[in-house]
Amino acid sequence: MDLFAGTIRTLENSLDYASAKNRAISNNIANIDTPNYKSKEVVFKDVLNNARQSSFAAKRTNEQHLSFSGTLGTPYRVVTDNSTVYNHNGNNVDVDKEMAELAKNQIYYQGLVDRISGKFSSLQTVLRGGN
């Protein structure tokens, strides 16, 4: 039996993503004065990763096409931005952008925590017999 139809697993993966993003932003802010430091960003590895849990069938017509069976691992990866330079020391961390991303990520994370807390609260209510 899959309790909550995979919702908790999806929320858990989303929390992992938000935590990884928070670590990347924190590292960027901590290294704002480090010479030649390049900012890092957490991005989704594959947009279709969420679709792998749905119940559609896919037919591969070429060996180079993505397979929809098995696991694809974590749905995100950390990439380094080597395309820009903002400071004279080779550093490319934009503190305003990082602070805005941090605020947005904190709101996202809190929403996920509230949602998963609601799921566990519902489960607790059921286990107590509706009280």
Image (cartoon, rainbow, N blue to C red):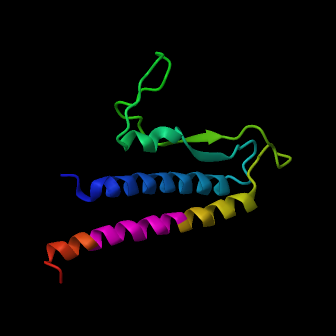
Which image quarter is the C terminus in?
A: bottom left
- The residue located at (45%, 40%) in the rendering is 49
For this orientation, the residue located farthest to the right is 88
- The residue located at (86%, 47%) in the rendering is 88
28 left or right, relative to 112: right
Q: Position of residue 129 (x, y in %)?
A: 13, 78
Q: How many marks?
A: 0
Vertical placement of 7 versus 122: above or below?
above
Main secondary-structure element of the magenta-colored stretch: helix
Q: Nearer the viewer, residue 23 or 88?
A: 23
Vertical placement of 61 versus 26: above or below?
above
Q: Position of residue 104 (x, y in %)?
A: 61, 64
Q: Position of residue 64 (x, y in %)?
A: 50, 18
Magenta stretch, residue numbers: 108-121
Vertical placement of 29 versus 48: above or below?
below
Is residue 109 rendered magenta in the image? Answer: yes
Is residue 123 rendered magenta in the image? Answer: no
- The residue located at (75%, 55%) in the rendering is 94
- The residue located at (73%, 51%) in the rendering is 93
63 left or right, relative to 121: right
